Image: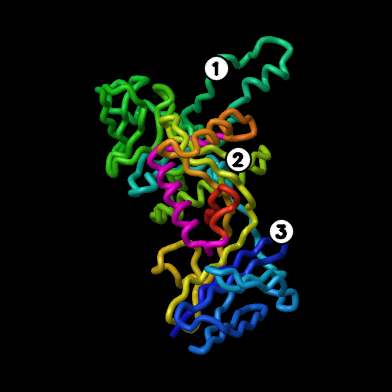
Amino acid sequence: MATTRVFLEVRRRLQSALLILGEPKEAGLPMDISVMPSSLQVKTSEGCTEIGLPAEVRLIPSSCGGLQYVPGDGLHLRLQAQAGFSTKLISVFNQSSQAQDCYTFYCQSCGEVIIRDRKLLRVLPLPSDNWGTLVGEWCCHPDPFANKPLHPQENDCFTGDSFYLVNLRSDLLQPRLELAPVVTHHLSSENHFKLKPKTNTKVICKRCKVMLGETMSSETIKFYMTEIVIQPSERNFSIIPRSQFVQSIIAQCLVELSSARSTFRFSIQGHDSKVYILLWLLNSDSLVIESLGSSKNIKKFSLLEDISKADSISALNAVKVLYQPCIKSRNKELASSWESDISVHSLTLPSATCLEVLLILSRNNATLPPSLRYMNSFQVAFLKM
């Protein structure tokens, strides 16, 4: 039986929704559409398909308007909608704020234990990158913090925009080794290090060889949030699909920074200082429901996930972004202008992760209805939170 693709974006703050019903490839038009508060019904010459909405989403059928047919997409219509559930986020900057417990640091990619049973007495946010300039503006005397880097003590964890700073305790090292400021570290659950005389500061998971962070000094390591999972030691670790985890971290970083600093444009750059992506945050209150179509009468929903996970009927929060890739010298002039713009905030990640983010954005963009994939010269994508 021919099936109909359904795309629904609900804006929670605006209490409005955009509904796109793609025409069945086999049956085509005409089709009869019935919009009900908790479901949609599509009738074609091939049969009837009912699409049940998640319990937290309610449409207002009497508000339907702006009906139009867009070639390549199908039928577009706008209507009022209600999404009555909490949108409170667990901040990536405060996810370990319940200090004084023992925490274990895991490699997100393979689950290897990196630091076991670390008691965190203080979890503190780091100031912004230009904090030194602000101190100079406020102080009438020489900067008392000049040339004094902020390094965590043994039971501290400092959180930056996209990273954690933790203290590298001496008891983590084999006694016969000395930790040089510029070395490569391979971390494992046995807390063994392999030192290589190379001029880089990468911290690499011993099991899967993924870059986890960098050494900042002989006592401090910077772990990137996209590579590390920190959770109470008594809790069992379960691996989250990589794409889902990276999307969530990036989305929450964008929301936090836009709220705290009124910053909506971001430059995603690698640890090699190369710019990979330019991001422009459009909104953070989207609720996206998508049905790609199947042979079942009652369709389930997924947001840019594998078909094997299409059984979930939960609506998913997402941030809507515009993006431009900057690899292979693409958009070089735009990247240069953004780099000199003080309103653009830079987020640094491992270079491999930057490419992952670009791949996720491209894949997510390709799943949107064609008319929604571009806005001016930018590409459009949703990042699941």
Quadrant in which the C terminus is drawn: bottom right
Numbered mark located on residue 13 in the image: 3
Question: How would you rate the neighbour count of disc 1 (Cα within 10 Å): few for under 14, some for 14-19, many for 20 or more?
Answer: few
Numbered mark located on residue 265 in the image: 2
Does 26 sit left or right of 88 as displayed?
A: left
Q: Nearer the viewer, residue 45 or 322?
A: 45
Q: Residue at x 59, y 83 (%)?
A: 41
- In three-dimensional space, the C-alpha distance between marks 1 and 3, rounded to whole angstroms, equals 44 Å
Disc nearer the start of the sequence (1/3): 3
Q: Residue at x 64, y 34 (%)?
A: 343
Mark 2 in CB contact with mark 1 (< 8 angstroms) = no
- In three-dimensional space, the C-alpha distance between marks 3 and 2, rounded to whole angstroms, equals 21 Å
Q: Which circle, 2 or 1, is nearer the viewer?
A: 2
Quadrant in which the N terminus is drawn: bottom left
> Element under label 1?
loop
What type is the residue that disc 2 sits on?
Answer: Arg
Q: Quadrant of residue 8?
A: bottom right
Mark 3 in CB contact with mark 2 (< 8 angstroms) = no
Residue 233: x and y, percent?
43, 47
Span highlighted in magenta in the image: 346-371
Instruction: State whether residue 297 is above or below residue 75.
Output: below
- Residue 358 falls inside the magenta stretch: yes
The answer to whether residue 383 is visible is yes
Q: Residue at x 55, y 82 (%)?
A: 29
